[in-house]
Image: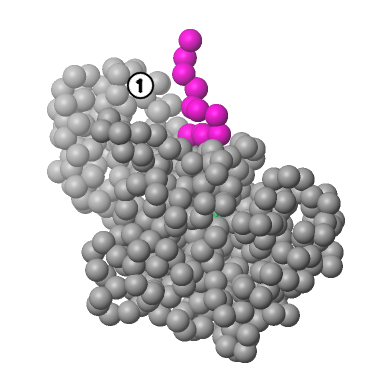
Amino acid sequence: MTFQAPKGTFDWLPPRSEQVLAVREALVAPVRRAGYGYVETPVFEDTQLFARGVGESTDIVTKEMYTFPDKAGRSLTLRPEGTASVVRAVLQHGLHTGQLPVKLWYSGSQFRYERAQRGRYRHFWQVGAEALGAEDPALDAELIVLAARGFSSLGLRNVTLLLNSLGDGNCRPAYRAALQEFLRGLDLDDETRARVEINPLRVLDDKRPEVQARLGGAPLVADHLCAACKAYHEEVRALLTAAGVAFEDDPRLVRGLDYYTRTTFEFTHGGLGSQSAIGGGGRYDGLSEMLGGPPLPSVGWALGVDRTFLAMESEGLLGDAAPGRVQVYGVALGDDARRRMFLLVAELREAGVSADMAFGGKGLKGAMKGAGRSGARYALILGERDLAAQAVQVKDLTTAEQTEVPLARVVEVLKGKVQ
Ligand code: AMP
């Protein structure tokens, strides 16, 4: 029996793995240009960090965490999201005592024990950006614009930005009570009724059609925002409009995590079916305090790399042509020629030319097949007779044209050709 990757996980293999690396880079390029610094946190953390930081009533914490005791009996959890870890790191290292906002980005695996389906995995990849320690609508707008730029730089067109405000400690309690009263009057299953008591806003986020059908007359947070939250939200909207970023107001947008306040947003893609969210985020002014830190109003997002990739596929943006693995491929015949080729490919790589060679003692035919598969533009053919003449045959694989080049000059010649 051979092993399979665990349920809900999959492998990225060439050439798609190369393409997904490029997608990750493109998604974070805008935040890097905006001065966000790279942060890398552990893949596992104290379970309590997520229990408190993500919220005890969320699906993530109640059902989806990969939690295990280590050998000393500590309860650890594979990270289901990035924000709690970033806030923990900022507090632990006192970054918030320096210049504010602290601007950070990350990229990495996340783990959630979800019902696996296309676009929903148990191990997936997010890139994220967080700006901590400032309450400024321009910061919310900046992050939204940067995420939108990341998607548009990949050529994605079928993206919708949904925007909402959840209010703050001032106006949300009254809204929460009004919503709770409405929800208590509905015919809901026991689990949902329990949720009404713990976190009624999240009922709005319930994706089940039978629940959505009952929510028709639910009070909307937009009608309950206090003057300060309303002004803040209007400013975010105005800045987005000025920046040319289109959005739709979605008064039902709540998102699954407990820590959001004021601005929340989600990017969805029209080509993905039910798992349409390709990224989302919002303001989380209360999270630092929930984790035992000082007040640290903050805003951030996480973008789903796997789903962004699927979105690109659905828009035909990935192309079928496998990108060339290397630019030059060496084919040597005979032991001495093989030893010389071994040094030659190393010299080419040193000179900045990507190069590979045939391994495993293949004959000319097999080795040339390898050259073709490598995607290289040039094959270098070195036989015993070439070696004696201190020369090598350079074959352009697109035209089949072959020229003889002195070994002493071949690195220079190829450098000129491929650059
Ligand atoms: P969240 O941390 O839940 O706000 O998710 C942010 C983004 O990560 C989503 O918009 C998705 O693109 C992606 N994402 C979340 N959960 C999964 C999953 N189970 N599989 C793949 N992508 C996911």
Q: Residue 37, relative to residue 328: is it above or below?
A: below
Classed neighbour count for the residue bearing mark 1: other residues with Cα under 10 Å, few (<14), some (14–19), many (≥20)? some
Q: Is residue 8 magenta?
A: yes
Residue annotated with mark 1? 364
Highlighted magenta segment, given as a residue range: 1-11
Residue 241 spot, x, y in % from top left: 62, 84
Measuring 16% from the left and 35% from the top, which residue is drawn there?
Answer: 343
- Dominant secondary structure, magenta: loop
- Of 393 and 47, which appears nearest the observer? 47
Q: Estimate the x, y position of residue 412 in percent, counting from the top left.
A: 21, 51
Q: Secondary structure at mark 1?
A: helix
Q: Height in image: 152 above or below 319? A: below
**Would you say residue 411 is visible in this rendering?**
yes
Tag 1: residue type?
Leu
Residue nearer the viewer, 238 or 18: 238
Q: Is mark 1 within 8 Å of ligand 1?
A: no
The x, y position of residue 107, in whole percent, is 40, 54
Q: Quadrant of residue 385?
A: top left
Check residue 269 for magenta coloring.
no
Which quadrant of the figure contains the C terminus? Answer: bottom left
Q: Say which residue appears at 21% left-offset and 25% top-offset.
A: 338
Look at the image and tell me whether residue 238 can be seen.
Answer: no
Colour scheme:
one colour
230 lies left or right of 252 = left
On the image, the x and y values in percent for residue 235 come to: 58, 87
Up the image or down, 163 lies above or below 318; here it is: below
Q: Residue at x 23, y 44 (%)?
A: 348
Q: Nearer the viewer, residue 386 or 41?
A: 41
In the figure, is residue 401 to the left or right of 152?
left
Q: Could you tell me which residue is drawn at 42 percent across and 63 percent down?
A: 290
